[in-house]
Amino acid sequence: MKLATLKDGSRDGRLLVVSRDLGLACQAQDIAPTLQRALDDWERLAPALEDRYASLNRGAARDTFPFDPHQAAAPLPRAFQFADGSGYMHHGKLMMRAFDTENKIDFQEREPMMYQGCSDSLIGPCDDIEMADEAWGIDFEGELGVITGDVPMGVSAREAGACIRLVMLVNDVSLRNLIMPELAKGFGFVQSKSASSFSPVAVTPEELGEAWRGGTVHLPLLIHWNGVEFGRVNAGIGATFTFPDFIAHVAKTRRLCAGSIVGGGTVSNAEPGVGSSCIAERRAIERIAHGEARTPFMKFGDRIRIEMLEKTGQSVFGAIDQKVARVRAS
Amino acid sequence: MKLATLKDGSRDGRLLVVSRDLGLACQAQDIAPTLQRALDDWERLAPALEDRYASLNRGAARDTFPFDPHQAAAPLPRAFQFADGSGYMHHGKLMMRAFDTENKIDFQEREPMMYQGCSDSLIGPCDDIEMADEAWGIDFEGELGVITGDVPMGVSAREAGACIRLVMLVNDVSLRNLIMPELAKGFGFVQSKSASSFSPVAVTPEELGEAWRGGTVHLPLLIHWNGVEFGRVNAGIGATFTFPDFIAHVAKTRRLCAGSIVGGGTVSNAEPGVGSSCIAERRAIERIAHGEARTPFMKFGDRIRIEMLEKTGQSVFGAIDQKVARVRAS
């Protein structure tokens, strides 16, 4: 099934069930007021949501209305966790080669590279990415992310797949010119990984059919920057670590609560001509080829669109389609 | 005022108002069901909670009952954020000197060292710290933490103090033998900073009176490990950065939502005889003095108690008083 969160002026929005073709939505207030509440009691509530989804798809649901992604918040507008991995070795190797940190490649091959990200104020699919300064080096990162149920401490990667409740697209907004000084301090990303954006709908793994296997989605991630195709990288290719690995990695020393978001890292593979899922990777390729990066980072007013299509052309998650804007005083 | 969260079988527990002497509690369900809900609408709800607190302290509240810290969850059993700083330069310098990373001291003097921690499954004050393996190097870290209201992006340190809603004690549980390999990867702490524990009550800054000034609490943090005093370090001494600095640091590139927890770092100062607030610091002192660390990390069954007393001897936040236990299968 496909679920979304309608902006209604509240902090957590209102849970919606969305039709397979993303054309129609209906409320699910009588089942769960918010997506977090549905996740908190998933075993009991998911069957009723699945029933509503089936009704919606066969035209039998009541009180339906057109689904408008501009009215959608992030599926979880605030979440209790966002832990993001870096699953695609090609991306990691390019970045390390460009930045002379190749001594770290062996880490990446042995176990997942992950960071604890911020999750308290997540951005809706069509909302502006608000920033104060273009000089921070504003970049997008096209990723997949999953939302987990409760995960026991010490779960194995084999068991962790069963903890995945929903799959989404993520724009892991990154401030490239803040990353190097911040990572040099040694404590990871705080300022340089600001709030991320999420697709209009979150989708159960079952809904993905045969595209969901091996713990990831086997479809190309389409990235358009200012209307020009930038990447078309298949998320099913080149992933050294996938979502069950990442969940097991985080859960080694603690439980994860239902509603934890786990990211899979910038989708990247070595196949020629597929492009990249972030500007930093293209700049790394340029640096390796020409000795210097040529593509600038994003400017205020720039648009970024991230989407994934089924083989039929149907959008799976809807599109993240947003622009970078100067932050308004609040 | 003093607020707590009663374990009631739900994920977020039930909001309680607790008397100044921590002896009595009363429900606040009619005002807000949970602490997060109170924080979500603080301007409107805090006055009613303050009224209830005043009634409780003068013996006029209804349906009071003895406050039992063993029935208390963390004030926020799950939070949307935990960003932890390292405010006490003495601790940082000792650690860096012991671990030959003194090249990083200049960073720490220039701007706050902070990491994004996990916040999805926080530990109650008297609950066990459950771990799978003593070999991870289980350590406590005695800290103060604050809970913020909504914080605008780009807030200045001067303005950020007004965003502090509540103050707590924190045991920032750290797995020392996992830290070095994890930090070497460059992405910060994931496995090596597991879930933290919090004091029985969270207290408004006003409640702290003259002990709250300069953005921190000017009282000694008492640490007892297996009943033996380990530290008595005054949190008002030696803080290069305090809570307003940390909040402004995190908020440079994004908003923080109400209910964000910001930690102030292991309390530490150079005064002789006051001890330390974590084992790692004592080990660093031993390594510098004797060329080797002598104090082992915690074992299963070890107890850690963290408390702060007013000059009158009254406990401010109640005590974190917990033991390390082998994780139960879940």
Image (spheres, coloured by chain):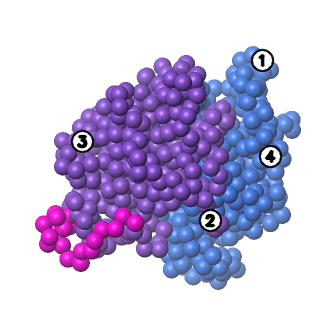
Chain colours: A purple, B blue
Is residue B201 or residue A286 the one in the foreground? A286
- The amino acid pointed to by label 2 is Arg
Viewer-nearest of discs 3 and 4? 3
Q: CA distance from mark 2 to mark 3?
A: 40 Å
Depth order, front residue of B148/A236: A236
Which residue is under mark 3?
A: A212
Amino acid type at mark 4: Ala
Circle 4 chain: B
- Please provide percent x and percent y for residue B60: 64, 83
Give the quarter of the image for residue A271: top left
User: Secondary structure under badge 2?
Assistant: loop
How far across and down, in percent of the image, does residue B5 sit? 54, 63
Horizontal placement of A326 versus B283: left or right? left
Give me the residue at 66% from left, 77% from top: B50
Give, as a single range, the part of the protein colored magenta: A52-70
Comes first in the chain, label 2 or label 3:
3
Q: Which residue is mark 2?
A: A328
Subunit that carries the residue with mark 3: A
Asked if labels 1 and 2 touch by Cβ distance under 8 angstroms, the answer is: no
Q: Are marks 2 and 3 on the same chain?
A: yes
Q: Secondary structure at mark 3?
A: strand
